[in-house]
Image (tube, rainbow, N blue to C red):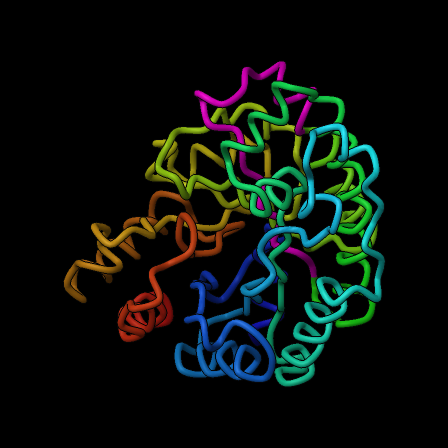
Amino acid sequence: MNKRERVISALENKEVDYVPVGFWYHFSEEKQKGQACIDAHIDFYRQTNQDFIKIMCDGYFGYPNETLINMQSVSDLYNMKPLGSNHPFIREQVERAKAIVSEVGEECCTFYNVFCPLSYFRLQIDWDKMMDCIKEDKEAVKYACSVIAEDAKTLVKALIEYAGCDGIYYCVQNAELFRFTAEEYRDIVEPYDLEVLDYANSISKYNILHCCGWSGDKNRVEVWKNYKAAAVNWAVYVEDMELSEGKDFFNTDCVLGGFDNRKEGILYSGTFEEIKAETKRIIESAGRRGVILGADCTLSNDIELDRIKCVLEAVRN
């Protein structure tokens, strides 16, 4: 099997010659845009020799809509309009993806990181201001999310149909236990999450859902049970839910993850023997079909690449 065949077989819950592996991290500031970013992705992929590329949206966090940037009152949100496909926020990300896909060709699958609408909103104005806006006029925030969803769909379409990505790595957030009740989440967040995800699924069957646990706070994971994607990735060590358990919980054919992404985890701080043992333990627990090894979330970018290669060696030998 080549890398593409291996990853696609895993996503389709078919037999593989060995369990595919993929990790990623945010690149340093000087490598977050332009050719430097493209080169950084290719160099990381070549040095680790892992099975696919998750293309980061570094440099494009937030949603640079002038109405949102200049907001004086939450009511201003009702004036928001989509950025459109020619805006640098969309166009430059698509060109990045196209350049990376062109470089690797049919060698491996590529997936581009796309945030859910409320996260784009929050990344632009911060957590506290987001919650203040919701408390003051949740309908205004919902309207803003509907506008952001339009641009997110425009981005997704171009990433898949023009740039040639196999799918998106769709990051859903904002479900911490303390933030919303399940009912509030389904009212304020879910419709716009699903608008983008369902659209992505309509043009590619190889999208990955990332139920983000980056903050270390447990999420109300049940709100994501009806979010469908080819594979689901969540924070095993935050949610206390192993891959085998999550496969049933999310009713998915494929799961991605298994390793703690934090510095106290075995991947970052353990010995090579411990990393190999953990690799084998995860596979024995989760099985070989419908499994892709990775991490709970983004790794620290100062990790020794030999640690990632150690996982690959343990799987392939």
The part of the chain drawn in magenta is 167-189
Residue 148 in percent (x, y) is at 75, 44
**Which quadrant of the figure contains the C terminus?**
bottom left
The residue sitting at 52% across, 28% down in the picture is: 175
Verify whether residue 180 appears in magenta: yes
- 21 or 195, nearer to the observer: 195
- 248 or 130, nearer to the observer: 130
The number of callouts visible is: 0
Residue 21 in percent (x, y) is at 44, 63
- 311 or 199, nearer to the observer: 199
Dividing the picture into quadrants, the one containing residue 224 is top right
Up-down: is 53 above or below 133? below
Q: Is residue 1 visible?
A: no
Residue 208 in percent (x, y) is at 61, 50
Residue 9 in percent (x, y) is at 61, 60
Verify whether residue 124 appears in magenta: no
The residue sitting at 43% across, 39% down in the picture is: 213
Up-down: is 302 above or below 67? below
Lateral position of residue 303 relative to residue 43, left or right: left
The residue sitting at 82% across, 32% down in the picture is: 78
Up-down: is 165 above or below 95? above
- 18 or 179, nearer to the observer: 179
The residue sitting at 59% across, 39% down in the picture is: 252
**Which quadrant of the figure contains the N terminus?**
bottom right
Q: Is residue 38 visible?
A: yes
Up-down: is 317 above or below 274? below
